[in-house]
Image (cartoon, rainbow, N blue to C red):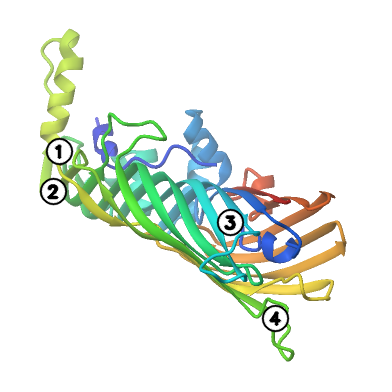
Amino acid sequence: MTRIFCLILLIFTLPGFLLSQNVADNFPLLYAKDTCKNLLLIKTDNYYNSNAIHNNFLSSFYKGGFIDSLSKTRVSNKLNTKNNLGAEISFNAMYYLHNSIAMGNAKRAFCINTGYFEYYNTTFSENLFSLIFFGNKQFAGNNISLALFNYQKISGQKIGFGIYNKNSFSSVCINFYNLSSYQNYNVNRANFFTEANGQYITLNINEQITITDTNRRNIFSNNGWGLGTDIVLNLNTGKNRSATIDDAFTINIENFGFAVLNSNTLHQAADTTINYSGFQVNNILNINNLLPVNLTDTLKLNYTKASKNILLPFTVTIGKIPSRYTTNRIESFYGIRYRYASNYKPLFYAGVFIKVNPKFHTSVNLQTGGYGNFNLAMQINYNPLKNFWVSVGCSNLSGTLSGNLNGKAINGNIYVAF
């Protein structure tokens, strides 16, 4: 009988928690007035996307529900050699002290920046998916490659202090980071062989694992610290903008810096061949005591503890943006967004920003790249009270509305001036 060796799958765990990439929110630049003394912008951005796996499959996988063969086959038919899945959960608050004076210049003021973030991303092969969800019988007598595989998770908080230009809202913030969790699994080579009659398997593998202290799992746990910067450079946006160019542009760099994981961080690396033909259990009552030892020995997972320096997963956005000084009711915007992550492709976007009336604005744009393929995005901005704006948006309308498509997204903003 052909065996399904589930222990091998422990190496290749896909991310469990999955929940818009908001590329057009520019509230202070759009709605700030010169008479304001203080400005507060609160925003949240939550999404997941994939170029291969549809929402119904992910929902069943995460919730532990039944995944029928039709659903698995549908995913399998869309897989490529390299498949991506990624997610982001973020919450940020920016406080602009508009009445302050920074560095003796009345055009500059101080700002405070704080936030929480969780980033997930994974890359996996078609063969790995087939092994996990269809078993190894299909590969009997054949040698297959399960690589490349990568999974990364990083979460933490930040607080920053900086200076901004009151006219253009260009800003520089220096941030201090607390890293609550970091996980990184890399499999560069994984050649898997199943004996024709299912009597044994062989795995020739080259892999590296880094995990922060597993005893500290709280979202505010300290498993490392970091230092970085957020830079926003808005060009041709102020009152004295170019008379011949009526377009505003932005360069936005977020979380550019480094972090140091603490000394309890676990490290493991192997370049080896694993042969497995099963465990021998003489007393079924002692199986719980035997399996952890046998699993560790079989997989040769010998961990060491040491600190580690890493780069933060920074984001760069460059593009044309709407501006409050433009009199046009309809403005185009476009640009490119890149996230420093193993499988994030440059995301290109283009759309229109529409001032329906003084209290209601909306935008629609088409995106391609990131963790998925093509997405249709929409944002709605509403002004219910004086100097108060709220916004709700989605960077993947079709996926959010349909379980048969890929990805879901939602973002929101609150802007208050006083």
The residue carrying mark 4 is: 247
**Between tags 4 and 3, which lies in front?**
4
**Between tags 1 and 4, which lies in front?**
4
The x, y position of residue 333, in whole percent, is 68, 73
Answer above or below: position of 376 versus 291.
below
Residue 6 image label? none
* Sequence-wise first label, 1 or 2: 2
Gap between marks 1 and 2 measured at Cα: 8 Å
Asked if one can make out residue 67 in the rendered structure from this viewpoint, the answer is no
The residue carrying mark 3 is: 21
The residue carrying mark 2 is: 270
Helix or strand or loop: what does disc 4 sit on?
loop
* Sequence-wise first label, 1 or 3: 3
Q: Are marks 3 and 2 in contact (CB under 8 Å)?
A: no
Helix or strand or loop: what does disc 1 sit on?
loop
User: Residue, x 49% and y 49% (percent of image)?
Assistant: 87
For label 2, the crowd category at 10 Å Cα-Cα, with few meaning under 14, some 14 to 19 and many 20 or more, is: some
Q: In the rendered view, does 191 fall on the left or right side of 89?
A: left
Helix or strand or loop: what does disc 2 sit on?
strand
Q: In the rendered view, does 400 fall on the left or right side of 51?
A: right
Q: Are marks 2 and 4 in contact (CB under 8 Å)?
A: no
The residue carrying mark 1 is: 301
